[in-house]
Amino acid sequence: MKKIAVGILAHVDSGKTTLSEALMYCSGNITKLGRVDHRDSFLDTFSLERDRGITIFSKQAVMKYNDTEFTLLDTPGHIDFSAEAERTLQVLDYAILVISGTNGVQSHTATLWKLLKRYNVPCFIFVNKMDLDGADKLAVMAQLRTNLDENCIDFTYRNTDAFRESVAVCDDKILEKFYETDSVENSDIVRAIKQRKIFPCMFGSALKLDGVREFIDCVDLYTQMPDYPDEFGAKVFKIAEDNHGNRLTFLKVTGGSLKVREVLKSDKNVNAEKVNRIRVYSGEKFTAIDEAAAGTVCAVTGITFAKPGDGLGAESDSDLPMLEPVLTYRVDLLDGTDPHTALTKLKIIENEDPQLNVVWNSRLAEIHIQLMGEIQLEVLKSIIYERFGMKVEFSTGSIIYKETVENTVEGVGHFEPLKHYAEVHLLIKPLKRGSGIIINSRCKEDLLDRNWQRLILTHLHEKTHIGVLTGSPITDVEITLVSGKAHAKHTEGGDFRQATYRAVRQGLRSAKSVLLEPVYEFTLEVPNENIGRAMTDIQRMNGTFSSPESRGDVTVLSGTCPVSEMGSYTKEVMQYTHGKGKLACILKGYEPCHNAEEVIEGIGYDCDADLENPCGSVFCSHGAGYNVPWNEVEQHMHLPSILEPVKEDSVSTNCKNAFEKCKNQDDVFALDKELMQIFEQTYGPITHKKAPEKRKVTAVSAIDKAAEKLMKNPQYNGTEYLLVDGYNVIFAWEHLKELTERSLDGARQVLINILCNYQGYSKCNLILVFDAYRVKGQYREVETVNGISIVYTKEAETADMYIEKVSHKLAKNNRVRVVTSDALEQMIILGNGALRVSSLAFLKEVRQAEEEIRNIINND
């Protein structure tokens, strides 16, 4: 039987839960048709959901139809609970997006569409409420194609020539067959839908069951079950409790199978927790099973370590969510509940929704919690009272700031009171925006035992580390354990906790910190006469926007703006447009704060006075421990610095300056040995596997000779590869650089032509790499032109990153040369075992090859 997990998403009040009910009824899986307004719907089982008439928590129902078993996952429609919807998207095979026939594409609809695109979920669209006055099929269809995707296709009449033509133009393969046979195969449509090249649209009324059965037939016909691997894997997407207080971990099996009493494979399962029960829920009821096959969405008991987004077995953890709270509230206890008791109970809710981020602020002696908006705030108060009997209120929300670092530093933590000992060295490096925190280790086991290393990594994971500017959480950093020391007698586990926390703080205190603020990506639609006011407002709020887009009587403005400035702007828009304006906001991410000094001063955080998060270390002398300030720790630490003698953030500058001082080839040769020493001091010694001897490699430049000497002339069996950093070469060759002033595309095409000739003469495998990482939504593209491979990097991937990764892979068994003059990249290439050729040295090679080609032609 085909197993399909399908989620139902919509803007609030579009009829999403009503459609879920109708699908269950029309497929024969329920015998009574419930209604949201009658408070008896099959999936809205929580009392607060029935009282308010909205979905708060995602629910699932099993729907069998023909030879397909659908698992319907009904998600919240209100924007305040959109994080719950995003978590559900991670386990979907397909999605059903419900659109109101009277309201069309609304603000939250666009947000959901971006989420579906991010998680690459194929989508069917059901336009609901077509029985109401004002519902216009043609108008809605135009909105779908304009605001969502031009490949939204009406699937109402599937046996017409117009339908086949509409489908064919969405996919090149279908179009080719259509021209040859004048027909379209269902299998091709299934493939195109799966690849998000076609989005089927159908119309009806869920409340009156109009068009619902036809929609089920469409979804059943055009979906296919994924091919699952044999190795076990699962993705956790929800945590809840049953009526008896048992913790339920909801997951989807994405490979192999899961059995009762099986130990879940995960690095976080340190206590070897086993699955006690496996339950398949449908509404409030569940069926207990002994084994869950791949594709099954189920809940398991007996597990406490897993959180939403965790991957189990072969499945990897999810990336950071796109939607996250930007407001934090103080929890006020109204009934005299002890703060410690309240915090413990609120942590239970946090396990179910990690983005609540319940924390005890010891500096202010307050409980803080993060929320999406006022509706979630009211709902949470009711949940806390219903589950725990606690009456709480929430203070006015304040912006959630974050912090990061600009430069790479070494953080050192030492904890050595009498009869205790631990020292930890961490490398803290900045990452690109939106990366979160990456934690890893490259510490040698002969320096620090593996068990101690695991303990340190656990301590790094277990705590929300805060910055030194405002005490806000840190983000976009990589923390790497690089060195540490224990004592055979005196070291205890708690010692490394203290040393680890202090190492993070000391590193942050030493680094150049940056305050980050949340930024909205907005779309503002106002009448034409109000566009001047709108543009002035955005500029006043320190926002940016692209050129206004005119759409008949309205003008659309798109851009970004700090959340702190735009928080209440929706009401202003409604006022000055007399209800005709529309503002849609989605969190873009975090960027440097526009008024950092003002915010830092207003918060008034003193990192050196924070006793809960000390930046200094504890050392021992004459049998007594004493505190050492953060800026003196390096003078007392027992292990050598991993950044000595050259700071990593200065490597690129030093290399560039050193190259400029070179007057001849001997100077370059000497410099190469120095660069290799810097590389090994910074990243560790280089080791290479020597391949069987085949032929001697002839170095072209002095730096290649240095690399050959240092690597003892490794010989390779494989192919010869030449990787070229395209833009580096263009701006290093004067005649191409001059071309860029007129046309960058022209310079790029000239370089391609030159390299095609060179490749034809040298017979090497030539890979030309161009940066496209600043192009939003750019996927990596590879094309072949006259024998050379041309790579355009994907979004957030530079040419350096691509070349580093490819050279590391190819250099194991092949001769690899890399053409670049980037000072830092050349060191990484040396470490990968490849030979570096400067852009100017390569120009001499190319000209020599061109001269030899001309001689051959003239002699002929």
Image (spheres, rainbow, N blue to C red):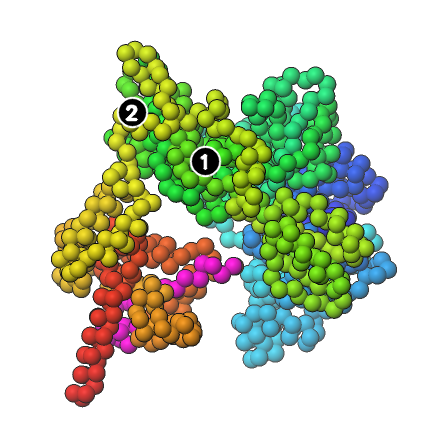
For residue 750, which quarter of the picture? bottom left
In 3D space, how far apart are the residues under numbered discs 1 and 2 (Cα atoms)?
42 Å
Instruction: Tell me the element at label 1.
Output: loop
Label 2 sits on residue: 636
Q: Residue at x 53, y 71 (%)?
A: 173
| The disc label shown at residue 573, or none | none
Q: Identity of the amino acid at label 2?
A: His
Q: Which residues are magenta?
A: 755-776
Label 1 sits on residue: 265
Comparing 423 with 196, the one in front is 423
Up the image or down, 7 lies above or below 196; here it is: above
Q: Earlier in the sequence, mark 1 or mark 2?
A: 1
Q: Position of residue 373 (x, y in %)?
A: 69, 40
Q: Is residue 758 on the magenta stretch?
A: yes
Comparing 288 with 514, the one in front is 514
For residue 457, which quarter of the picture? top left
Q: From where the camera sits, is residue 572 visible?
A: yes
Instruction: Tell me the element at label 2.
Output: helix
Q: Residue at x 48, y 41 (%)?
A: 514
Q: Which label lies toward us, 1 or 2?
A: 2
Mark 2 nearby-residue class (10 Å; few <14, some 14–19, many ≥20): few
Q: How many marks?
A: 2
For residue 379, which quarter of the picture? top right
Residue 672 placement, left or right of 206: left
Q: From where the camera sits, is residue 43 visible?
A: no
